[in-house]
Amino acid sequence: MGYDYSVSMEGVRAAENQLNHAARKVSRMGTENRPADGTSDRLTLSGDMDIAGAMVEAKQAKILAQANLRVISMQAELEEETLNLFG
């Protein structure tokens, strides 16, 4: 009577892909060159990359994964309850 978890697992894989995409965005964020006069050791994020957008994408991936994992958990609980009723 096993349930097919493939749809929920595909959702988990989609979340993993989204998180990896966000991580790649962050990893590509370069730094501006230090001032030629050496007055600052501070590096700043390049303006052409959007860290806020990458963080939102990562948060969405986390929520997507949690939702799909909860569906899998609920499916397993329902299957167990069904077996208990009929078994």
Image (spheres, rainbow, N blue to C red):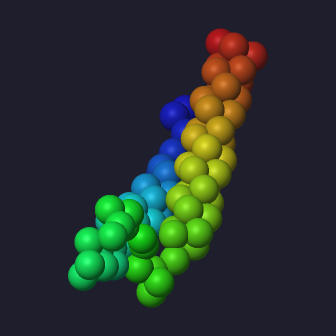
Q: In which quarter of the image is the C terminus?
A: top right
Q: Which residue occupies the foreground of this view, 62 or 41?
A: 41
- The residue lying at 45 percent from left, 66 percent from top is 22
Q: x, y (%) of residue 19?
A: 45, 59
Q: Is residue 29 left or right of residue 4?
A: left
In the rendered view, tell whether residue 7 sits above or below residue 56: above
In the rendered view, tell whether residue 13 sits above or below residue 80: below
- The residue lying at 26 percent from left, 78 percent from top is 37
The answer, for residue 43, to whether it is visible in the render is yes
The answer, for residue 86, to whether it is visible in the render is no
Q: x, y (%) of residue 64?
A: 61, 55
In the rendered view, tell whether residue 59 sits above or below residue 24: above
Q: x, y (%) of residue 8?
A: 55, 51
- The residue lying at 24 percent from left, 82 percent from top is 36
Q: x, y (%) of residue 18?
A: 47, 65
The image quadrant of residue 53 is bottom right
